[in-house]
Image (cartoon, rainbow, N blue to C red):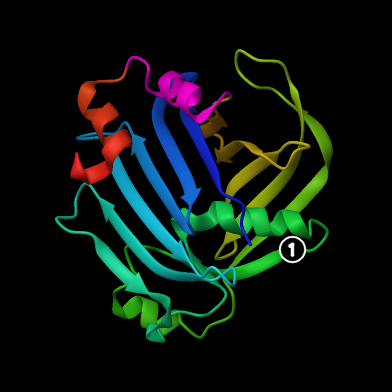
């Protein structure tokens, strides 16, 4: 069973903040809101994944980004998705499962939210697992901007044979950093959820703050 959590991250590129990610796991539902500066408009996405309270499987996935007029909803028990699968916005839950048995790679089916209600999802529903999370190397020093270095372990997330994300996990099994290639890095903001929220949103425009607080209902 997953333990509830609430976390804020800032996304950094070339030493500049380019986005914010908020994640809350509560009452078996993982809520994620993500904003990234982009042209011609910022990318905004909101995901809700309801987990089965008795297993580590997802039950319902609700996803929307700024280009969609309505939320797309998928049900795992529709028969179209494997049991050991996870929409991409739920990757942190698979990482946390991998932390329980760090010496063994965790494999699963990685699902793209934009394809889950298309024929592409049907064609891959019974293929071999296409994703893996594995620990790499020993504990290392991790440099954190405007903070002291942390001792952390590196976990890699692979999808379709490609390295997608490198996660850094501290001694308390908290995910403190995630890197997408060499361009974008997400850093967990320390403090209570309220403190971390204030720090993450400081200086951002009102519409961004409203989205991160209330999603597309804002």
Residue 104, relative to residue 140: is it above or below?
below
The quarter of the image holding the N terminus is: bottom right
Where residue 135 appears, as percent x and y from the top left, is: 76, 52
Question: Is residue 13 in view?
Answer: no
Q: Measuring 64% from the left and 21% from the top, which residue is drawn there?
A: 144
Q: Measuring 29% from the left and 73% from the top, which residue is drawn there?
A: 117
Left/right of residue 168 with respect to residue 137 in the rendered view: left
Element type at mark 1? loop
Residue 104, relative to residue 54: is it above or below?
above
Q: What range of the chain is rendered magenta? A: 191-203
Where residue 108 appears, as percent x and y from the top left, is: 60, 70
Q: Measuring 30% from the left and 20% from the top, which residue is drawn there?
A: 204
Q: Quadrant of residue 33?
A: top left
Left/right of residue 218 with respect to residue 190 in the rendered view: left
Residue with the mark numbered 1? 105
Where residue 34 appears, as percent x and y from the top left, is: 37, 41
Q: Measuring 81% from the left and 33% from the top, which residue is drawn there?
A: 140
Question: Is residue 128 in view?
Answer: yes
């Amino acid at each position: 069973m997953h333990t509830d959590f609430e976390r804020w991250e800032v996304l950094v590129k070339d030493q500049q903040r380019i986005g914010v990610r908020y994640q809350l796991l509560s009452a078996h539902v993982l809520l994620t809101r993500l904003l990234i500066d982009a042209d011609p408009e910022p990318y905004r996405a909101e995901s809700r994944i309801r987990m089965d309270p008795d297993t580590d499987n997802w039950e319902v996935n609700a996803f929307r980004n700024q280009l969609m007029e309505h939320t797309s909803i998928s049900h795992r028990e529709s028969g179209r998705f494997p049991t050991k699968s996870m929409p991409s916005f739920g990757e942190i839950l698979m990482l946390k499962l991998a932390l329980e048995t760090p010496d063994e790679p965790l494999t699963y089916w990685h699902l793209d939210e934009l394809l889950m209600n298309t024929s592409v999802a049907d064609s891959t529903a019974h293929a071999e697992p296409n994703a893996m999370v594995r620990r790499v190397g020993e504990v290392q020093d991790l440099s954190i901007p405007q903070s002291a270095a942390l001792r952390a372990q590196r976990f890699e997330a692979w999808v379709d044979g490609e390295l997608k994300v490198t996660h850094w996990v501290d001694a308390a099994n908290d995910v403190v950093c995630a890197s997408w290639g060499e361009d974008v890095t997400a850093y967990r903001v320390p403090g209570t959820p309220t403190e971390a929220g204030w720090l993450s949103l400081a200086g951002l425009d009102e519409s961004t703050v409203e989205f991160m607080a209330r999603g597309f209902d804002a």
